[in-house]
Structures are given as structure tokens and as C-alpha cells.
Image (cartoon, grey):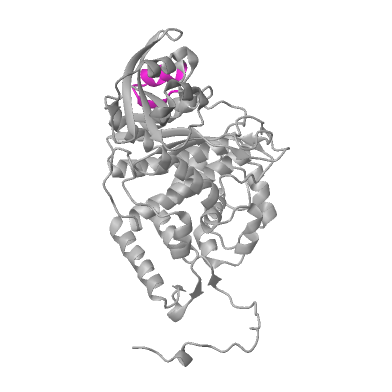
Amino acid sequence: MRLRTSLLKRRVNGDLMLRYQAAGLTSYAGLELLRRFCATVGVKDLLRRKLSNRLPRSDFSSVSLVMLLIAMLVSGARRVHQLGYLESDPVVARFSGLARLPSVRSLSRWLGRCEDPAVEALAEANAEITSAAVQALKLKTLTVDVDGSVVSTGLTVESARRGFNPHHRKVPSYYPITAYEARSGLILRCQNRPGNVHDGKASLEFLDALITQIEDALPARPDIEMRMDGAFFRQDVLDHLGAAQAGYAIKVPFYRWLGLKEAVAARQRWRRIDAKLSYFEIDRWIESWQRRQRVIIYRKKVAHETRKNFQLDLFDPDDGHYEYSAVTTNLGISGGSLWQFMAGRGTHEQAYAELKSGFAFDAVPSQSYAANSAWQQLNIIAFNLVRRFQMAALAEKRTTNQKRRTVFKFSTIRTLRYQCFSRAGVLTRPGGRQTLDIGTAPLVRSFFERVERRLLTSF
């Protein structure tokens, strides 16, 4: 039925008068659904066990302050001082388990007093959160992407160093490293580091702690296959992964002493994967390392001149332009499958992008290195809890492929805020029972009802 045009218009004669008196209003009604999920899986009990006597003392419970910071990160806050905008929000208070929220100064001081034991406790809590999800998925093989990312800091931040910042080389930074499990879509481990630390050179301790975490957290040790970039192509890393019986696929830089350029120049026949991509495989003896490595070299035909100038003299210009790459692996898969497998590393970059733009992983809330490391751990926990919430209540399963894409199809945190977390509501007490009224919009109602049903049936 068509409506008359006159019924679609509204006349606005003046400004609305603003009033600041109503109680019970919330801008984050969807946090109630996340709170129910956290209560069901025992997040607060887990935090009590892991954080007991390891976080700074306060008049407020440490567990409640951690839950408050998680609520802030999920709702979109990027700075501690933005807590002031949540001061009278009843759903945020319920989520954190507080009758009254702390002041910005109190929360900032508490976070600034976090030391190394607090960072370790938060990392242990995250390990248990992720291990429960991995066990539920019954994965026989864990596909782990290990990589670092730059977080720019101020000039006076503790342990910030100039180093491997590709876009701002003179800016002091941190260089945190994370381990991302590809099929669950969760970040297993995170460790903050100064900005002048080399990814591969400083990774042995992290890799050892990661493998120990997997072995301790899961009842039966699954097979592990790791994907890494060229910074990890080092003798000590390869020896360490071999001793740990972990599979790996690592990008190989075209170092002169490897002789890969000469091997490409001498190659006559390439095995085709598709119209533009081909490869060949060599068994390379590395004299300086006294070890033999399986190396697969790829070439991809492109329409532009490659930026890798050292490759331009390998072929006659009439042959077109190619980009070359090489991968070493101890996995028993073909060159075509290995290309797809390595292409799956892009999901780790997407996780980093969401951590930095959707959460506040790249924010630096304190001058203290330990406090900033704790902030990163809180971001990782918030990210993983949102993903686990989607597994239980929202995301649909899908088939995996050679890229090892996630078992579930996840929405970004920005989408979830629009659909769920950042929905307006009002807390009322009809008949003496506390009720959250979210309004009459049909899509919002159907979304909340669907999540509520799935939370009741998932556990």
C-alpha cells in the first residue's frame, strides 16, 4: 500500500530542549548479551584464579577493573579517560560487576602500577580462554601464524626504541609479536617488545613459550604447522622448530649466499599452477648452516614492472614481468598446495587490522612498559572473547580450504557494535523485575532474540 507524500514528512519548528535527568539509560545494551556469555563460560572465575594477588591492589576488585576495561574496549573506547562518558551507564556497571565506576584518575593509576606479574597473569588467562575454544572445535592440527607488528609511541615512553618501523623510521615504537591460530580465528599468545628487536632473532623464547602453552593447555598435543615471513628464516629458528616436531612454512629471502637467483636463471621448465603462476622445487644444501632445505620457488606474471630490481635481468623483456618468491617447508604438501597454504597468512594481517582499528591495540595509555604490555593483553582478551561470543551465538560454520580459513564466518567488531553492542536501551523495573528495554525496531528485536536463544541452547 502506497502512503501519501504528506504522511512521510514531519515539520520541525525549532530545536529540542535538552534534559539530563532520566536514569537507567544505556548506549550499550548489547553488552548484556556478552555479559551472559561471559557468565556462562566462567570468565570472572577464570580471572579470579589467574589474577589473584598478581595485579595492583585497589579499593575496587581487580577482576571488576579488568572487566570494565574489556567493556570499554568492546564498546569502542581507545583511551582510559573516555571512561568518563560511561559513568552513568547501568549496563556497563552490570558488566563489570560494580555498583559505582571508578574515576578516570583511579583507573589510570591502577593500570600504570601493573608490573610483569600482572602481564603474565593476563597472558595465562588468555591462554585458558583460547584453549577452551580450540578444544571445543576438536582441531587435530593447529595452523599458527607468527608475526610482529609496529606500534608507534611517544618519545618518552619506557622501552620504546627506533627500529623496524617501515613507515616512520625515526619514530620510537614497540614491536609486539603474536601467534594467531588460523582456523579458530583466535590469538593464542602476545608478547610486547621494544621497537629495535628483530622478529626472527628474538623469537626463540616466544616460540618455546607458545609450544609449551599448547602442550600444557590441550589434553592431547595436536600437530602444529607454523607460517612465518622471511625474518624467521634463520638456522636457530629452523633447528628449534625441528626439535619441537613442529611443521613450518617460512618465506625465504633471496640472499646471495643461497644461490636462488642463479637457480632461477638456469631453470628451463616450470610447473604451472594456473595461467599466471608457476613454480619449481629444489633441495638446497646450505653450507654455512650444514643443513639441507626443501625450497619451492614461485614466479607470478604481472602487468607491471616488478619493484624487485635484482630480478629484472633474469629474463629477456619480451618474456614479460615476473615477481618471484620462495618458501621453505618440512610439510609433505605439493608446491600448488603450499602456495595456497601461505596465502592464508593474510587472515593474521586482518586480525592485526581489527586489533588496531577496531580495538585499541595501537594505543599507548601509559609511560610504563609493563602497563602498556598489560593494555595489549587486555586487547587480546577482548578480541578473543568477542570471537568466542560469535562462535556461541552468531557465527555460522563454513568449510575450510587449503588456506586454512576460519571454521566460523566472523563479523568485524564495527559491524557488531552497529548491530548489537552499541544499541540504546533503558533499564526499567516493571512489576519489580529489572528489565532492559531495547525498543521496537523489528531487526534489532529479531537479532537480540536470536542471540538469546542460541546462548541458551549452546551450553
Q: Quadrant of the N terminus?
A: bottom left
Q: Where residue 12 sits: x, y (%)?
A: 60, 87
The C terminus, quarter of image: bottom left
Q: Is residue 422 visible?
A: yes
Query: Can residue 221 be seen from the camera position used here?
Result: no
**Looking at the image, how many numbered discs can be counted on the residues?**
0
| Residue displayed at 65% across by 84% down | 15
Q: Is residue 367 above or below residue 11?
A: above
Place of residue 47 in the rendered image (x, y in percent of width and height, measured from the top left)? 48, 46
Q: Is residue 242 magenta?
A: yes
* Residue 417 forms part of the magenta stretch: no
Q: Name above or below for residue 428 compared with residue 224.
A: below
Left or right, 105 with respect to 47, comes to right
**Residue 393 placement, left or right of 205:** left
Image position of 4 with respect to 443: above or below: below
Residue shown at the point (51%, 74%) measured from the top left: 426
* Residue 147 image offset from top left, x and y in percent: 48, 33
Outermost residue toward the right in this view: 156
Q: Identify the residue at image location x=59%, y=78%.
A: 22
Q: Is residue 392 above or below residue 325?
A: below
Could you tell whether 66 is left or right of 156 in the image? left
Query: Which one is nearer the viewer's eye here, 54 or 446?
Result: 446
The residue positioned 56% from the left and 40% from the top of the image is 53
Q: Quadrant of residue 296?
A: top left
Residue 32 on image: x %, y % = 45, 63
Q: Which residues are magenta?
A: 236-252
